[in-house]
Amino acid sequence: MIVTLTANPALDRTITLEAPLRPGDVQAAVSAREDAGGKGINVSRVVAAAGVDTIAVLPLADDDPFDAALRASGVVARRVPIAGHVRENVTITDPAGVTTKLNLPGVALGEADVAAIVDTVVAASEGARWLVLAGSLPPGAGDSFYVQVIEAVRDAYGDAAPRIAVDASGAALAAVVASGRPDLIKPNDEELAELADVALDDARDLPRTVLDIARRLVPSSVGAALVTLGAHGAVLVDGDGAWTAVPPRIRVASTVGAGDSSLAGYLLAAAEGEGPEERLRRAIRYGAAAASLPGTQAPSPRDLPDGAIAIAGLS
Ligand SMILES: Nc1ncnc2c1ncn2[C@@H]1O[C@H](COP(=O)(O)OP(=O)(O)OP(=O)(O)O)[C@@H](O)[C@H]1O
Ligand SMILES: O=P(O)(O)OC[C@@]1(O)O[C@H](CO)[C@@H](O)[C@@H]1O
């Protein structure tokens, strides 16, 4: 069982253009689609599509139209009732795969909402292998919200607690790294650089630079880091070693959710008892599959790209 928490879900509206976006112009759009999104929900959708049990925890008002999209996704969910409706995030994609994204802040949570979410995650995590804490925090949650969740789950289950994976950025990621001792973090290269307060602009060897930064955290504060690099693939660093791989060439439709799918691929391989190389390979394949699908569509095993993915060790 893989449990996910999405504290700030989003109805993802994707608008497809037949020409590059021209800011300031009126432009005809070809099509639009809606997906029940938010990073944890996306991870759960990929996990469910692979036939593995998952529960997605999220705050959701009883009368929120988002629930229809969530039900259509088929993901098993635990809803924490709140006041206010899920934000709508807009993505604009063009024929070259260029993706423009506008994210709203989300519904503000009160203290009672925060406490109810923590309690719901603790209850859902009983017997789970992994708990995934993913995405931005909505107003009212506080930068250390993920640390609060991690401590509550570990207090409740001790050695039987699920392993913890975190996909966050900015202050929320910094707080988790400072005191949450997560088993896995999944930043992209820019999020990692922001965390370490370094610039990547002139990195000639991106995987090597990312490894050097990640080594400051792994294994002292974080069990492992899966750092995704967009079209350049990903780097995996754990206490035993470091590896990198690049994705196959694909036709990009929308990169939204590619990182979430990478994380799901990693967790699916981990749940099968696979070692780091296969976890990285699966992450790359799922990420590439997501980027080749429209909107925030979750890839299933039949969407994975063909071809071998070579893993290179880094030292
Ligand atoms: N243009 C691309 N071509 C092939 N694979 C891609 C491309 N973009 C992304 N991927 C795959 O998806 C993975 C994750 O991508 P990326 O680093 O962009 O995630 P992210 O920034 O966390 O994205 P998001 O927050 O939208 O989920 C990469 O490691 C790679 O395997
Ligand atoms: O504002 P956040 O929580 O950082 O990101 C939200 C979001 O961009 O993340 C997913 C893609 O990773 C989308 O489904 C969703 O719209």
Image (tube, grey):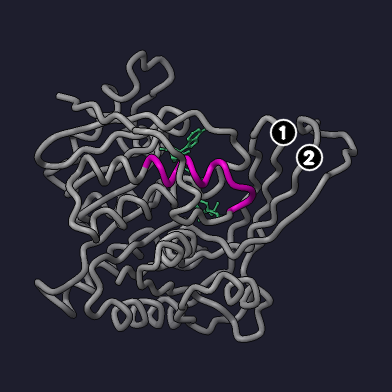
* Up-down relation of residue 108 to residue 197 (above or below): below
Q: Earlier in the sequence, mark 1 or mark 2?
A: 2
CB under 8 Å between callouts 1 and 2?
yes
Ligand 1 is within 8 Å of the C-beta of the residue at disc 1 = no
Residue 280 on the magenta span: no
Q: Which residue is at 63% across, 61% downward? A: 35
Q: Which residue is mark 2?
A: 17
- Badge 2 local density, few (<14 within 10 Å), some, or many (20+)? some
Q: Which residue is at 43% across, 74% downward? A: 57
Where is residue 13, by image quadrant?
Answer: bottom right
Report whether 261 appears left or right of 218.
right
Amino acid type indicated by mark 2? Leu
Mark 2 lies on a secondary structure that is strand
The stretch in magenta equals 284-296
Q: Which residue is mark 1?
A: 95
- Badge 1 local density, few (<14 within 10 Å), some, or many (20+)? some
